[in-house]
Image (tube, rainbow, N blue to C red):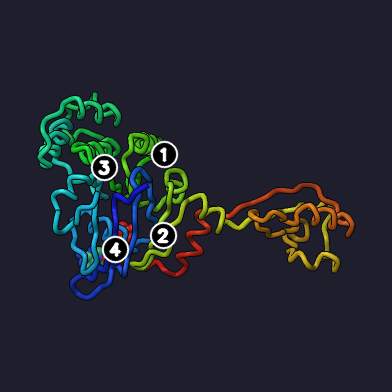
Amino acid sequence: MSAIVSVKDVNKTYDGGFEALKSVSLDIDEGEVLALLGPNGAGKTTLISIICGIATASSGRVTVGGHDTVDAYREARKLIGLVPQEINLEPFETVMNTVSFSRGLFGKGRDDAHLERILRDLTLWDKKDTQIKELSGGMKRRVLIAKALSHEPKVLFLDEPTAGVDVELRRDMWETMKDLKSHGVTIILTTHYIEEAEMMADRIGIIAKGEIKLVREKDALMDELGKKQLVIELAEQAMGIPESLSDYGLSLVDGGHEVIYHYDSRKERTGIIRLLNDLQSAGLQMSDVRTEQSSLEDIFVDLTKGEAR
Ligand SMILES: Nc1ncnc2c1ncn2[C@@H]1O[C@H](COP(=O)(O)OP(=O)(O)OP(=O)(O)O)[C@@H](O)[C@H]1O
């Protein structure tokens, strides 16, 4: 896969001297879904705004489809669809006019079939002649997506697309995103919902205090940083860990009713079988065994500890 968006060493200092981005470099591959996670004020919107050419970087370079977002702004911008955080629609306009006007702004010729397809995909077709002011909040969000897709962009930026929407609509939005991905659209998504990143993303980027802390394949990230533990429930309360088991680094929890063993699931030998045998030899009877893995949320909290501002 080749990078469709390339961010090289971007810095952003706002008037007043606040450094919102510090040496940010990031390549986004064609067709992938990248989720950008970060606490409030981390710099996510600033980064998206710079890539979309709405804000200017203080230094560094961004290209989209090989076009420099400053020197070749128009070409770069044509490839991008942006779904902003805030709903900024004209209340008296109809859905269809809103979407077709947006297409026109990018100099694209009329294509009724394309607009119909987008509106149908987003279950807005029945509302095509309805004025924006008569739509629910969730429908307005979908209009924002339709608008962003009207000029057939290759890269779609979604800035917290499901903030404040109900569970059902959130699921609909996820379906929409999956559908767009299957049509080859590259998606960059900012979100506070870890579950959303876990569900949708191929790669996860974590940003805090204006710096990219890491960018990694989601599965690899969960494997690498997701600590695994084996929880062994004891049939009878134990008063302590027997001396013969001291090498395992076990902890006794739940008032002596559970033993916890941390292990690395990527190793060929996890030590689990040997431990279970040794527990038995030490006279500890087990009533149940389960494994637990830390979630993306645990990983995120670990990496951004104390970084919110
Ligand atoms: N126009 C501006 N002038 C000065 N400072 C700004 C401006 N826009 C943003 N900032 C500051 O830059 C930092 C990053 O803001 P940004 O909106 O990029 O964060 P974010 O990660 O998108 O946050 P959130 O999750 O709350 O939307 C914040 O401290 C913010 O106050």
Q: Residue at x 86, y 66 (%)?
A: 244
Indicate the amino acid at tag 4: Lys
The mark nearer the N terminus, 4 or 3, is 4
Indicate the amino acid at tag 3: Lys
Please tell me whether mark 3 or mark 1 is closer to you in this view: 3
Q: Residues within 10 Å of mark 3 (few under 14, many from 20)?
A: many
Q: Which residue is mark 3?
A: 154
Q: Residue at x 80, y 57 (%)?
A: 275
Q: Which residue is mark 1?
A: 167
Looking at the rendering, which quadrant does residue 227 occupy? Answer: bottom right
Percent position of residue 190, x then y: 35, 52
Q: Identify the element where label 3 is drawn.
A: loop
Q: Which residue is mark 2?
A: 206
Residue 17 visible to an observer of this rendering: yes
Percent position of residue 9, x then y: 29, 67
Looking at the rendering, which quadrant does residue 237 occupy? Answer: bottom right
The mark nearer the N terminus, 2 or 4, is 4
Q: Which residue is mark 4?
A: 8
Pick the front one: 281 or 203? 203
Tell me how far mark 2 sits from mark 4, CA to CA. 17 Å
Percent position of residue 268, x then y: 69, 54
Tell me how far mark 3 sits from mark 1, CA to CA. 28 Å
